[in-house]
Amino acid sequence: MAVTGQPLGAVAILGLPGVGKTTLAKGLAQRCGARLVSRDEIRLAMFGPCSSTDGEKQAAFAALIGAVTTNCALGHLSIVEGMPFSRYGEYEAVAAAAAAQGHVALPVLLKIDPAVASQRIAAQRPSAHAVPHDRDPALPYTVDRRFREPPPSTLQLDARRDPEELVNAVAERVAACPPRRRGTRGP
């Protein structure tokens, strides 16, 4: 990842639903002074209340890519979450948006057994106001079946670890990267 000497423009949090991507992303954004870019939040802002259609997800993803591109152009780090990144092309699009602005992306995979992720989602369901409508305890199994091998540069972490430990591990990797360029290119 940092072998190229290019600055880090995006950290993409990969993993099954229920692994804690949002918790990690929020903590990391705060710790690193980065901008949180969430496909789920973008989708809610664009279409709230959401119907969870593929069209809504695609439109929100296009807006997410625009946010990453703009943040990189302005020299801001994007912490990207709100989707599992289980399909080929999703992480690659984030990496390409960063690369177009002279930056690199870091994929971070939160690994967990689908049964544990399912239990976490089931435990969240009573407080439905905090759970997206497309969350179901069966979802981790569905996503796990289509999950592809992450890029070789992926930082892989056990999602059962304490959230603060996870933030520390990723923040350490972010701190080891070359500094971001500010305002060097336009979107």
Image (cartoon, grey):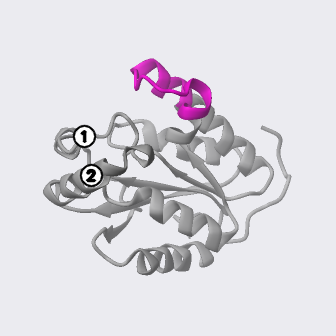
Which residue does the image show at 54% across and 32% down from the upper left? 43
Residue 119, by quadrant, is bottom left
Secondary structure at badge 1 equals loop
Judge by depth and name the residue closer to the eye, 173 or 5.
173
Amino acid on which the number 1 mark rests in the picture: Asp
Where does residue 176 sit, x and y in percent of width and height?
A: 59, 78
Query: Which of the two residues, 35 or 182, is positioned nearer the viewer here?
Result: 35
Q: Position of residue 135 (x, y in %)?
A: 31, 40
Question: In the drawing, what numbered circle is on residue 121?
Answer: 2
Q: Is residue 135 visible?
A: yes
State the mark number for residue 170: none
Magenta stretch in the rendered image: 43-60
Residue type at mark 2: give it.
Ile
Say which quadrant the C terminus sits in.
top right
Q: Is residue 49 magenta?
A: yes
In this rendering, the answer to whether 140 lies above or below 28 is above
Residue count near mark 1 (Cα–Cα under 10 Å), binned few <14, some 14–19, many ≥20: some
Callout 2 secondary element: helix
Residue at position x 27%, y 51% from top?
121
Say if residue 16 shows up in the picture. no
Chief SS of the magenta region: helix
